[in-house]
Amino acid sequence: MSEADAEIAVDASAVLALLQGERFGAFDAERIVGAWISAVNFSEVLAKLRDGGLSEDEADQAVDGLDFRIVPFDASLARATAWLLPSTRRAGLSLGDRACLATAAALGASAATADRAWARLDVGTKVELIR
């Protein structure tokens, strides 16, 4: 399986970069369509879109075409997210960041993000930077 075919879990930063038409590096932005996303990160995307001035309907429409596979944030993922705090604290990762990493780990997927700090982490999950 090539990297382009590999499963990914996306962070809000990657989704927002796509929706805002930002430049991507070697990462194929089309991989975001149909990707896995934690319910926490999905909520974060919607909140950022609303904070950016979109109505609820507009925010929903913006993400509807991306066909995300939303992963519920259950007790197992909540624990995995919490257990990542000590190893990610120095990099300043948020709850959403850790939820994405925990989701990727649970799925055996890579985590896609725009946050360069993730590349320096050793948490057992492959990180793919979008630029």
Image (cartoon, helix red, strand yellow):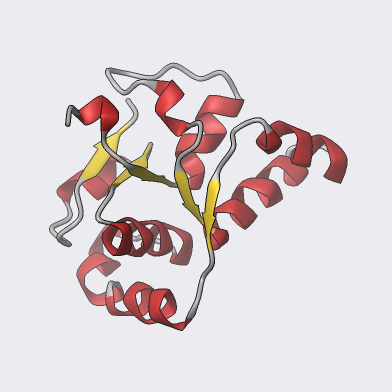
On the image, which quarter does residue 105 sit in? Answer: bottom left
On the image, which quarter does residue 92 sit in? Answer: bottom left
Above/below status of 40 relative to 66: below
Q: Which residue is drawn at 56% across and 18% down?
A: 21
Along the line of sight, which residue is nearer the eye, 87 or 69? 69
Q: Is residue 55 visible?
A: no
- Residue 24 is situated, as x and y percent measured from the top left of the image, at 39, 19
Q: Residue at x 42, y 64 (%)?
A: 99
Left or right position of 74 against 129: right
Above/below status of 34 relative to 11: above
Above/below status of 48 relative to 72: above
Left or right position of 61 against 104: right
Q: How many labels does the image show?
A: 0
Along the line of sight, which residue is nearer the eye, 114 or 3? 3
- Residue 130 is situated, as x and y percent measured from the top left of the image, at 34, 29
- Residue 109 is situated, as x and y percent measured from the top left of the image, at 28, 49
Q: Residue at x 30, y 74 (%)?
A: 85
